[in-house]
Image: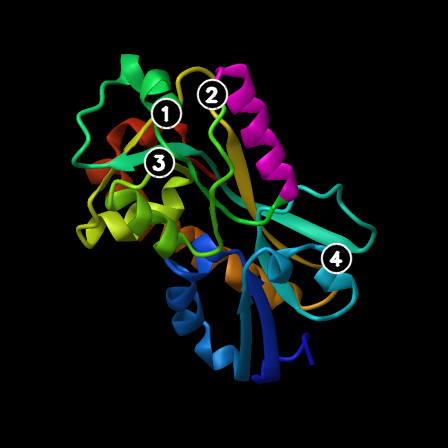
């Protein structure tokens, strides 16, 4: 049925949290005529490449950096650097960031072991040893804790741009030194649903350019040059 023009009976998509909670609804709206029933799941487990091989999903939008598997096609959508997220009430200067982070709790987010390892490596290199006190699974919860002054976090711009638009009391800073980056891709099984995969890619890239980049330019202008749309 993936090769036919008629709507699919069911379309199953897995999305990473930061995409699902920001651009995901717009992707579904633009493609709603592609399927009669939609099944969308979110989070780390739902956006792992292995879920395509066991056919839990037809397509995923993911930052999974697993080595490409046989019969799987990964099409990069965009790449972005992680940002330091602090409460807007805190008077912080770029040249004092490391000292500030050393004195505050860190609000950790997510379950991706590879990303957590990269973050721990950066923290160690910067001489920052925050206690593992807070670890949340939702972006909104993480940001609210930061906005309340409980601590700071590391998040990609996509995760926070809508919350900043809505007035969440946070501000973001570039990494001191080389930033941690992630690449978000649209992944599908080779030879299946090629035209739908291209529609998902096209809509997602269009939304990144029309909704995401203008917001970054307005609210996180120093991040704009480091974001790459493919």
Element at label 4: helix
Residue on which disc 3 sits: 152
Magenta stretch in the rendered image: 113-127
For image coordinates 74% across by 57% down, the residue present is 50
Q: Relative to 52, say whether 28 is above or below.
A: below
Tell me the distance, in whole angstroms, between the alpha carbons under discs 1 and 4.
36 Å
Mark 3, other Cα within 10 Å: few <14 / some 14–19 / many ≥20: many
Q: How is the image coloured?
A: rainbow
Measured as percent of width and height from the top left, residue 101 is found at 36, 25
Horizontal arrangement in the rendering, residue 161 relative to residue 167 (left or right): right
For image coordinates 20% across by 45% down, the residue present is 169
The overriding secondary structure of the stretch rendered in magenta is helix
For image coordinates 40% across by 53% down, the residue present is 139
User: Where on the picture, by quarter, is residue 120?
Assistant: top right
Tell me the distance, in whole angstroms, between the alpha carbons under discs 3 and 4.
32 Å
Q: Relative to 225, say whether 137 is above or below.
A: below
Check residue 50 in the rendering and tell me which mark sits there, or answer none.
4
CB within 8 Å, label 1 to label 2: yes
Residue on which disc 2 sits: 128
CB within 8 Å, label 1 to label 3: yes
Quarter of the image with the N terminus is bottom right
Sequence-wise, the earlier of marks 1 and 4 is: 4
Sequence-wise, the earlier of marks 3 and 4 is: 4
Check residue 101 in the rendering and tell me which mark sits there, or answer none.
1
């Amino acid at each position: 049925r993936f090769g036919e023009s008629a709507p699919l009976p069911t379309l199953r998509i897995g999305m990473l949290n930061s995409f699902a909670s920001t651009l995901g609804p717009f992707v579904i709206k633009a493609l709603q005529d592609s399927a009669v029933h939609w099944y969308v799941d979110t989070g780390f487990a739902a956006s792992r490449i292995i879920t395509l091989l066991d056919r839990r999903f037809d397509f995923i939008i993911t930052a999974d950096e697993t080595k490409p598997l046989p019969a799987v096609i990964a099409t990069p959508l965009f790449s972005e650097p992680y940002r330091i997220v602090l409460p807007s009430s805190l008077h912080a200067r770029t040249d004092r960031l490391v000292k500030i982070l050393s004195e505050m709790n860190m609000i950790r987010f997510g379950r991706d072991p590879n990303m957590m390892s990269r973050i721990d490596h950066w923290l160690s290199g910067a001489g920052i040893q925050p206690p593992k006190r807070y670890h949340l699974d939702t972006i909104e919860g993480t940001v609210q804790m930061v906005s309340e002054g409980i601590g700071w976090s590391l998040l990609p711009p996509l995760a926070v741009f809508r919350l900043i638009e809505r007035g969440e009391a946070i501000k973001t800073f570039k990494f001191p030194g080389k930033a941690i980056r992630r690449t978000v891709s649209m992944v599908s099984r080779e030879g299946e649903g090629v035209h739908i995969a291209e529609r998902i890619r096209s809509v997602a890239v269009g939304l990144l350019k029309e909704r995401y980049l203008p917001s970054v330019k307005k609210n996180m202008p120093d991040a704009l040059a480091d974001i790459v749309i493919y």
